[in-house]
Image: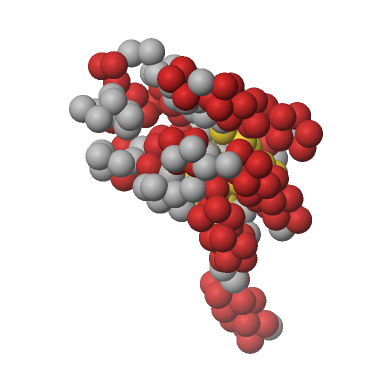
Amino acid sequence: MRFILVLFALLVSTTPALAAKTILVMGDSLSAGYGIRPEQAWPSLLGTRLSDKRLDYSVANLSISGETTAGGRSRLTPALKTYQPAIVVIALGANDGLRGLPLAQMRDNLNAMVDAARSAGARVVLAGMRLPPNYGPYAADFHSSFVDIAKAKKAPLVDFLLEPVAANPRYFQPDNLHPLAEAQPLILDHVWPAIVPLLK
């Protein structure tokens, strides 16, 4: 009997705890925390909020400054294998737009990322972006690309990632492109409603 109890104790002590489910963020400098400490960026704040709410999720922020949708697409497959995420937040496209890259190419990349994430069993949130009006008709087509993809894929959409801070210069670094640390909680509050329904 003692042998059985000892064996049971060993089995229990060596059984790993269930790992938290992962939210994978694939973004650019706006999600990587450019110009601020990484722990101040909204994806890190998301991880803290999930922990505070005792939700069994962790955040893997694979955002890279300067990233395009093509770069994100090329990195997504290995990331899905490594992290096996439950949720993927795709926050890419800003650099495609600022560089004036073909929108058909951007849409193809975003569609492929949504499909790849879903094929891996993940739920997807798409974060949209906007360009300054001086980009002309391209700016309108750019923004509508995110809306159209989200509608076609029936994916939750954050219409404009920077919406809560975009109109207020005090939330931006001197380059007027990258949000300060003070802006990050507002961005998180803006993204949060799209994520909550997917936390199963």
Quadrant of residue 194 within the rendered picture: top right
Picture residue at 69% right of the left edge, 51% below the top: 112
Could you say where residue 97 lies in the image, as x and y percent from the top left? 49, 36
**Quadrant holding the C terminus:** top right
Q: How many marks?
A: 0
Q: Compared to 8, does 180 lie above or below?
A: above
Q: Residue at x 76, y 56 (%)?
A: 119
Side (left or right) of 33 relative to 150: left
Residue 192 visible to the viewer:
no
Residue most toward the bottom?
A: 3
* Of 188 and 101, the residue lying toward us: 101
x and y percentages locating residue 64 in the rendered image: 40, 50
Depth order, front residue of 55/141: 141
Q: Nearer the viewer, residue 59 or 51?
A: 59
Residue sticking out furthest to the left = 174
- Give the residue drawn at x 51%, y 20%: 136
In the rendered image, residue 83, in percent from the top left (x then y), is placed at: 57, 60
| Residue at position x 39%, y 47% in the image | 66
Task: Estimate the x, y position of residue 71 in percent, counting from the top left.
Answer: 51, 55
What scheme was used to colour the molecule? Answer: secondary structure
Quadrant location of residue 175?
top left
Residue 6 relative to residue 31: left or right:
right
Above-or-below relation of 26 to 171? below
Q: Is residue 177 visible?
A: yes
